[in-house]
Image: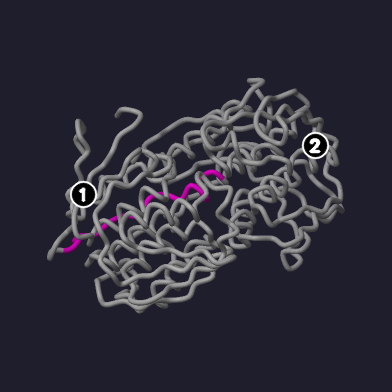
Amino acid sequence: MSKHYNVTISPLGDGGLKGIIQAPASKSSMQRALAAALLTKGTSTISNPGHSNDDKAALKVIEAVGAEVVINNEELIINSSGVNPTSNEINCGESGLSIRMFTPIVALSEKEITINGEGSLLTRPMDFFDEILPQLNVKIKSNGGKLPLVIQGPLQPANIEIDGSLSSQFLTGLLMAYAASDAKDVSIKVNNLKSKPYIDLTLDVMKQFGLKVPENKNYEEFYFDDLSRNSQLTTHNYTVEGDWSGGAFLLVAGAIAGPITVRGLDLTSTQADKAIIDALMAANAGIAMDAKGIQLHPVEMDAFYFDATDCPDLFPPLVALAAYCKGKTTIKGVSRLTHKESNRALTLQDEFDKMGVTIDIEGDDMIVHGGGIVKGADVHSHHDHRIAMACAVAALKADSEMVIEEAQAVKKSYPDFFKDLKKMGVEVILPGFVL
């Protein structure tokens, strides 16, 4: 498939979506599992692995720092003896989680390593590492707080205090690195931690792989005592969860234009974006849940209030949902959107404005004026996977076709997204390609 392509989506008219659809694999779960498998000495088997661009980037990272990966019938078998870099450079692609999680992990090595990325990752701030890594005996050179980073360990755990307001992903990497270096009687204090559910996921993955799990003191301090040890188990099996972040777009699509059933999403998951269920309930969407999956059907929906501070990746599907809800919907947490693949608040405002949907930004609140006619338009993904998917979902009941430019952005997290829409009965036109 070529590097850049546009997708045209025809609205469903009087018809609706139909069928049963499987949610994609969670890249949050997959990438953490890859990091844990690298740090766990022995063999790990990862079932239901993802194949998004971010997952592929994380796989390349663990191979570059010493893991051997074998693909066997939709399972990954990973053999590792810890962090032993075979290369002096790693590339995290466009994955924000990979760069933030693997940097402290790679710093466990005494080898000098250059850490780089691509696309929007090159403009994201990395000052955090300039400030924190020297406190852990790691030498670091950055490009004025941006990539590339040149680091040299080995990292030595110490009592530190960090700012958790920009991203919980920095803390995820530090927790894993501390566990792997057998940290004793040290703690990481955290101020203003955002996205706490993602830290729950990190701790859960660490536990499943037998890594030392710190005591969580109300998300303000993570204490590694000197009694617990890493597990001596040499074999670990882990099944990657279905992805609530990608699944959120399917659920909203069903609420706008169903009926469909979405399978593969664990209602007991610690993933932050499971909160999409709360938003759908708040909008009085047509939703029912049972052991067979989550069923959605279209009904008239109402404007709602939702705090997305701890789940900022839900903003794009929530805006698509709000466009079809009668009245003014308020979504809190705009401050979390600046350092994403695009500045998502402004991007959503610009692209939905083309569809005739007005979005106001007032401080930390986004106000979506919904319930009117959603117009077909030429919109642009801004190279942001979640913007591309939000526009596609909004297109389902628009008054005319929607053209999404640079639609290949979906490969970052959900490469089969347009195929899945087509399976549910959407007319998806991708010139020159067969879906």
Q: CA distance from mark 2 to mark 1?
A: 48 Å
Foreground residue among 435 and 305: 305
In percent of width and height, residue 15 lies at 13, 63
Q: Is residue 45 above or below residue 83?
A: below
Mark with earlier residue (2, 1): 2
User: In the rendered view, does 101 fall on the left or right side of 273?
Assistant: right
Question: Can you tell which of label 2 and label 1 is closer to the viewer?
Answer: 1
User: In the rendered view, does 40 fall on the left or right side of 22?
Assistant: right
Residue in view at x 23 percent, y 44 percent:
8
Applied colour scheme: one colour
Residue in view at x 74 percent, y 40 percent:
129
Q: Is residue 23 magenta?
A: yes
Res. 382 mark: none
Residue in view at x 73 percent, y 41 percent:
127
Question: Where, quadrant-wise, is the C terminus in this rendering?
Answer: top left
In percent of width and height, residue 417 lies at 32, 47
Q: Which residues are magenta?
A: 16-31
Q: Is residue 300 above or below residue 171?
A: below
